Image (tube, rainbow, N blue to C red):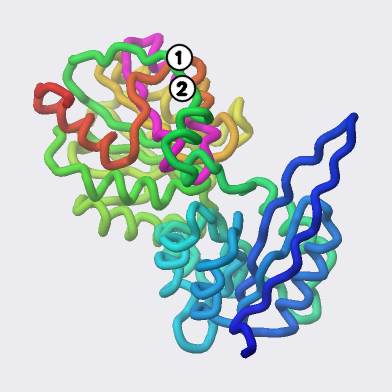
Amino acid sequence: MTQPFATVPARPVRTSDQTRQEPTIRLMIVDDSPIARAVLSRMLSAHKDFEIVALAGNASEALDALKSVRVDIVLLDVEMPGTSGLQALPEILKRGHGARVLIVSSICEQGAEATVKALALGAADTLPKPGTGSFAGRFSEVLAERLRRIGRVDQAKVGGAAALAAETVEVALRAMPNSSLSCLALGASTGGLYALGEFLKALPGPIGAPILITQHLPDVFMPFFARQIAAASGRRAQVAVEGIPLQAEQIFIAPGDAHLCLARGGRGVCVSLSRAPASSGCLPSVDNMLWSVSEIYGRNGLGIVFSGMGRDGLVGSARLVDSGGTVLVQDQQTSAVWGMPRAVAEAGLASAVLSPPDLAARIVARVRGTPWR
C-alpha cells in the first residue's frame, strides 16, 4: 500500500574525534504543487544543516506524517485543495510536538491580512513565495536564513520533566514593586503575535492604564495587526500617531516605521514618534518604547518582553528597572524563540518569567493588590 506522504531517508550525522556536528534541522515541505516541492527540496538539500524528512501534498497528508515523523520546522503553503494551510495551522502545531511553522506562500506578498492572521495563529514566520520565473537566486538564501533563525525544536519543551529541568536556564528574579500601575508596555518579535493574543485574551479589564505595543512588523501590516489585537483584547486598539493622548484601557501600537515614544504635553502624556537609530538596530524598537516609559512613568511603568529573536528590549528594560519600574518576560517553554526574553531574564532584570496567561494573571494581581498565588 502506498504511503500517503513521502518520507526521506535520514542523512547520517558524521562526527570525528576533533569535531561534533550540530544535529540537522529536520524539515517537512507541505505544498500541493509537485514542482514547488521539488524546487524547495533541491534548494534546501544543498545545505548540510537541513534534512528534509517528509513531503506532503496537502494538509491532511501533513497531519498524517506528523504521527510518525519528528519535525523541527514545517514549510507550509496556504492555498491548497481541501483544508487550507491556515485552517490546518492550529492542528499542525498541536500535533507537531514543538515543531514550528514557516508559511511559504504567495499570500504573504499579496495580502498583509492573511500574513498577520497566520502569525496570530502561531506561525513562527512568513515568507512570500516568488513567481514561477524567479523561484531561485536570492530566495534560496533568504529561505535558508529564515529556517536557521527559527532553528531546531527545543527538546526541553517536549521531552518531559527531566529534559526540562536539564535545559531550563536559572535566573535571579527581582522583587515586584506594589506601586500603582500607570502604563503597561508590551514588546515582541518572532512568535510574538500569538503570545500577545494569548496574553490579552487572559487580561480582563479594567487595569486603569494605557497599553503600548511594539511588535516587529512591516508598516503595511499594522492596520491588520491592530484589528487582531482589538479582537483578542476586547479593547480599542489603534496604530499610534504623533501627538495622540494616551487613555486608560486603550491600546496604542507602534507603526512599522517609527519608535513608539512618549512626551508630556498640554493634554497629558502623548505619543511622540521617533525614527532615530536604536541600539538594537530595530525599527520600531522595544528598547526605545521602554526607555520612554521609564522617563514618563518611572516606578509606575511596567514592561513585558515576549517571544522574539535578538536582544531588543534589554537596554530599555535596564533603564526601566533603574527608574524603579518593573519588567516581566515570557518563559522559555511557551516562547517560539526565547531570545529577547532570555536576554532580559539572564541580565537579572525580570520580576517574573511566566507564560502569557500567567503574565496576565500577575498583572491583575498587582492591579487589584491581591497575593500572587
The region drawn magenta spans 317-341
Q: For this rendering, which residue is in front, 20 or 186?
A: 20
Residue 345 tag number: 2
Query: Around disc 1, counting alpha carbons within 10 Å, would you say few (fewer than 14), some (14 to 19), or many (20 or more)?
Result: some
| Disc 1/disc 2 C-alpha distance (Å) | 5 Å
Q: For this rendering, which residue is in front, 103 or 61?
A: 61
Q: Quadrant of residue 142?
A: bottom right
* Residue 276, visible in the rendered structure: yes
Q: Is mark 2 on a helix, strand or loop?
A: helix
Q: For this rendering, which residue is in front, 296 or 360?
A: 360
Relative horizontal placement of residue 78, taking residue 7 as reference (left or right): left
Query: Around disc 2, counting alpha carbons within 10 Å, would you say few (fewer than 14), some (14 to 19), or many (20 or more)?
Result: many
At label 1, which amino acid type do we have? Gly
Image point 81% across, 66% down: which residue? 43
* Residue 273, visible in the rendered structure: no
Image point 46% across, 20% down: which residue? 170
At label 2, which amino acid type do we have? Ala
Indicate whether 96 appears above or below 176. below
Please provide percent x and percent y for residue 6: 67, 77
Indicate whether 133 appears above or below 44. below
Please provide percent x and percent y for residue 173: 37, 15
Please provide percent x and percent y for residue 308: 52, 40
Relative horizontal placement of residue 215, taking residue 311 as reference (left or right): left
Residue 328 drawn in magenta: yes
Residue that carries the numbered disc 1 in the rendered image: 348
Please provide percent x and percent y for residue 205: 13, 42
Image point 34% across, 32% down: which residue? 354
The N terminus is located in which quarter? bottom right
Indicate whether 98 appears above or below 304. below
